[in-house]
Image: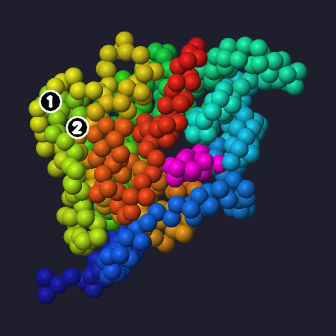
Amino acid sequence: MENQIPMAMATEIERGTKTQEDQWRVESQVFQIYNLFQGIPPNSQFAILELQRDKHIEYLTKGFKQLGRSFTVLDANRPWLCYWMLHSIALLRDCVDDKLENDCIDFLSRCQDPKGGYGGGPGQMPHLATTYAAVNSLITLGGHRSLSSINRWAHSMLLTCTLVLLVIKYDFSFLMYSRRTFYDFLLRMKERSGGFRMHDGGEVDVRACYTAISAASVLNILDDELTQNVGDYIVSCQTYEGGIAGEPGSEAHGGYTFCGLAAMILINEVHRLDLPALINWVVFRQGIECGFQGRTNKLVDGCYSFWQGGVAALIQRLQLIVNDQMGLSNILECDCSTDSDYDSINSDISADEQSLEGTSSHVNEMCQIREEAAGQPNTSHLADVNNVGYNFIKGHVHMKPLFNNMALQQYILLCSQEEGGFRDKPGKSRDHYHTCYCLSGLSVSQYSCTKDVGSPPLPQDVLGPYSNLLERVHPLYNVVLDRYYEANEFFKANSL
């Protein structure tokens, strides 16, 4: 009798907590999809794994023309809608037509503030998040008109006409002047602590640091004044778990971890983070559902395919620093496996170990190479921080993926993909945000075993037909790589 559990307590144990019940429900939905997939013939499996490219493009293009009334809540986020749709279309190896391109450029120009930065819509106050989204949108569109439009400045119709004449006569000199106003906006958002405010009177967090640093870097206006003490602020946000929080004392989070890590790379201070601890945190965010969660004990979410997958992709290029912090100087991983570690079609998806095969164990497979390996961030403060993004992506990768890349592709294609668009998880509805970051994560995953930026993935590293292959992204900025190269060349040719 004394060993018996009271009935009320037994019922509670059987039911579980709200968190447990939510997790069990999601696992059940995901495994039901996987079990159905396992039960169909192999040739049909291949068809189900196909990326519905045309339907996704149709869904995204339609979003530019008409959005439902529910989207009124995103009135202050319209540059984000542009970015999510434009970037997704670019990842799918397509582009918008000339009229839509010009309409986007004109609209984003109306979102600009005379004193620099972009608001969430015409006439709204400038905000670092929408500034980042607008800059990335214009870079994704590409071309002289789009890139030279960034932060045009005009107070009146008379001044507008005058500035148009200046552009015609002096062309890039006006561009340099307008980028100065952009720089001044970023500087106004800077705090003594090293953090940035999202807007005048707004919150200070790691997200603001990243959006400011990323925009300044890609526009070639990053300097010591903008980067001063930023590293101190971000280091103070790394938690005991190893991930990075939005602000000191908060919980580690996938989105903030990406923002913090990327910003630290861009300012040449990534060596100040505890990278082994960060690795230990991020590899355990990929669960038995095969996708990523954003925080400990949270549900899987398709958007973290990029936020967490992007963190892993960045760390792959930091091997010298990681090895130094682990006491393994001059030792790097021999190469990235040419054989996929995860055979999605023939695997037993119910086995937890197989779902997570090839994560943190990859860090220990090492071989001797030269310390001068390309692509390592220069930790000297004398280095030109505006070259970091270009040098970083051009480096050679020696470290295997820190996550199961084939498992992640399986989650995205089977659990997040809909007939046009992507969703968070089974049971949720598609939206443009998750479409953007599921596709971004899918791209990162497909290219995670390539050693050089110019090398395409092997067919065995792309789940489903090879036609599923997306454009490659620059993992520091999350823009399509070819568009980054164009912008990098454009702004370096017209430096302030």
The answer to whether the residue labelled 1 contacts the one labelled 2, judged by CB atoms less than 8 Å apart, is yes
What's the coloring here? Answer: rainbow
Query: Which range of residues does the magenta coloring cover?
Result: 83-96
Residue 369: image tag: 1
Q: State yes or no: residue 43 in magenta.
A: no
Image x and y of residue 241, in percent:
28, 45
Q: Earlier in the sequence, mark 1 or mark 2?
A: 1
Residue type of the residue flagged with mark 2: His
Identify the residue at image location x=73%, y=56%.
65
Is 484 left or right of 144, judged from the image as shown?
A: left
Identify the residue at image location x=32%, y=56%.
459
Q: Can residue 68 be seen in this view?
A: yes
Query: Predominant secondary structure in magenta?
Result: helix
Disc 2 secondary structure class: loop
* Nearer to me, 229 or 65: 65
Disc 1 secondary structure class: loop
* Nearer to me, 427 or 35: 35
Is 372 left or right of 223, judged from the image as shown?
A: left
Q: In this view, does 108 lie above or below 167?
A: below
Identify the residue at image location x=65%, y=29%.
144
Identify the residue at image location x=57%, y=40%.
140
> For mark 2, what is the residue?
398
